[in-house]
Image: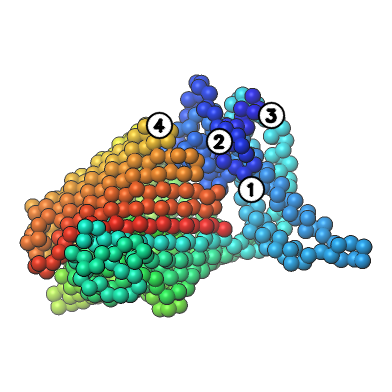
Amino acid sequence: MKVLALAIVCAATASAYCQNTSAPTVPPGHWTESIPDGHWAKAALEELAARGLISGYPTGGFQGPRQMTRYELAVTVHAAYLRLRDTIDGLSGSIDAIKNATPATKESKPVDLTDIRNQLQDLMGSIANVKAYGKDIENLQKLTIYFEKELNQLGVDTESIKTQLNDLNTRVSAIEKKRTPVDISGDVNLWMGAGNSRDDYYGLNKDGRIVGTSTGSSPIVDVFGPVATPAGLTRDATILFESAFTFTSTSESGPKWHATFVSTNMLSSASLGVPSSKVAFGDLSGNFNPSRGFTLGGYEEAPMDTYFQEASVVFGAKPAMVEVGRLGYKISPYLFQRQDNTSYFSNERWDDGKYRFDGVLAKFRAGVAGIDLFAGNSKGVQTSGGLHINPINSGPVDGPYSTSIGAQFTADQLAGAKVGVKLNPTTKLNLSYLLLDGDGSFFVGSKVPDRLEVMGADANASLGKLKATGAYGQTTLKSGSDKLVDSDNQAWNLRVDYASGRYGVFAGYRDVAGNYLAPGDWGRVGVLRNPTNLKGWKVGGFADVNSRVRFSANSEFATGKSDAFAEGTLLNSDSKVNSYELRLDYRIGPAVGIRLAYEDTLFRDMAGAASTFGNPRYRWTTVGLDYAIGGSSRFSLQYELSDVDNDYQVTTPGSESRFRGGFLTSQLTIKF
């Protein structure tokens, strides 16, 4: 029985100490009791998974709707115990080896001081994580009791585990006293993008970039096809690099501080209205599509640049704490959230939705209520080369004022408040207000706006397998105290999700008026991000065919909202936008997964100048692979075929709007 248990554990964790063993199928049984939401055991398992001690069984994670059986969960608990024990054993052994090193004498072999220094450097990061081991041990102690019956059936000596966990806790306490005052962590990312033309046409990706052109900064002879000289993947390849280092204080007393320093060639600016312009990813919040007259011709490496993304000090702790310095904050997608403007690059710093600014954030908690107050300056958040890292721009690129290129309101200063109230254990309501001061690049009548007010609410509630979310927002554009735009300025959305076992469905409705200008991130339709003057339904769902295969689909059926904003948005009350997405995920093993996806978005009966050019249609077919290299590294590879009639962007009679190229991307991420 113990041999069988070891084999199952090896399959569940793919750990280094399990070699040359097969992974039998989990024996059939009646272990079908699930852990309900909110149960302490579920939270403990999620903490262990987040720490990398367990990878799940058999699909590699706990995010899916299929709840693992108690038998499978017991397997992961035992595997986590073995992994943590070996980690602490290795750490203790390294410390003892250095401690027992003796100076050189005539009778002894000289000690290699270089080797000792290298060992000490390796230990710095490991010891910095020791405090978290204490929480891991506490979780494992409780979970061992909770799954004692299943562990005993695995052939595991639970009494021995309890004794050894107590011993590990004592050893961790001793090691923690040796930890360094600063924890250093970070990641390194290497990204490659290469486009190819197809059937004498360039490609167009989801970020509105033309691919399959040429390398370097060579201008594109003709932005729109047919292609004069077909380009292959080797001619249109770009390599981007970024490394980040986070320094965090480990002191248990006094203020806590942290700082994240980034070195990269991924950030760059672009020249408005220059079709042949090639840049890297731009900044962390701006996107370049689909402002008419402003089209980017692919990617190129930017000069190396550096910046501090965050650098702040936290005073106090719950229920009252204040953070000062360069910090990040967000509210919700429809109110205040930085756009994820890089569909082909996955990174927490780029994708977390937080705007960074230099200022202060105060948090107060009292009973079921919490208050966040914040204020600061965003204009000074720049790289050493002078590039604005994440401009806080009004939401839509194509909106009511987009007939002027780059016509967005940009905030230099901000202040705001969020009040959250937990109405009951499963229902929460947030009320928010945001004041942005800056400069608009357009006129409203005879005045240039210098202030944008954003206010709204969002709520979420759960009732068993049902979950409901909703949000409302309103923006007011001002010049001083004068209101310039205070009508057709609302947005709201509702969504209901139902998940049960191996399947789930959702339905939602949204309505975004033409003058809605919040600096949020409420989605993409074709190449159009943060659409306004649009309303309609979204429906979708997923189904787990088995423990390895998931199929998901979603669609949107929207119409233009008003004729009054036809010129800016190219949508009127007759316009229709239908979008479909299909995706198939197959998990080969705990570390490897492949996916196949298809997206199709069709615009009909466009307004204004766009009505001359037909019906824009955006189709992308993608196949990809993801490989988790251990617990700290990841490699992804995908190839995307585009089949696009980009009439939405084309406003010059006779211009070619057809794109049929391909785009190959890969990313290697190493965390430390």
- Labels 3 & 4 near each other (Cβ < 8 A): no
* Residue type for callout 3: Asp
Secondary structure under the numbered disc 2 in the rendered image: helix
* Residue type for callout 1: Tyr
* Residue type for callout 4: Asn
Residue 559 horizontal/vertical position (percent): 14, 50
- Labels 3 & 1 near each other (Cβ < 8 A): no
Placement of the C terminus among the 4 image quadrants = bottom right
Q: Nearer the viewer, mark 3 or mark 2?
A: 2
**Above or below, comparing residue 551 to residue 477 in the picture:** above
The structure residue drawn at horizontal position 92% and vertical position 66%, both measured from the top left corner, is: 106
Q: Which of the two labelled residues, at mark 3 and mark 2, occupies the earlier sequence position?
A: 2
Q: Nearer the viewer, mark 2 or mark 1?
A: 2
Q: Which of the two labelled residues, at mark 3 and mark 1, occupies the earlier sequence position?
A: 1
**Separation of marks 3 and 2 at Cα, in angstroms:** 20 Å
Query: How many numbered circles are shown?
Result: 4
- Labels 1 & 4 near each other (Cβ < 8 A): no
What is the crowding at mark 3: few (fewer than 14 residues within 10 Å), some, or many (at least 20)?
few
Relative placement, left or right, of 157 versus 504 is right
Relative placement, left or right, of 105 versus 636 is right
Residue assigned mark 2:
11
Residue assigned mark 1:
133
**Separation of marks 2 and 1 at Cα, in angstroms:** 24 Å
Residue 656 falls in image quadrant: bottom left
**Above or below, comparing residue 394 to residue 555 in the picture:** below
The structure residue drawn at horizontal position 52% and vertical position 47%, both measured from the top left corner, is: 50
Q: Which of the two labelled residues, at mark 3 and mark 4, occupies the earlier sequence position?
A: 3
**Separation of marks 3 and 1 at Cα, in angstroms:** 22 Å
Residue assigned mark 3:
157
Between 430 and 666, which is closer to the camera in this rendering? Answer: 666
Residue assigned mark 4:
546
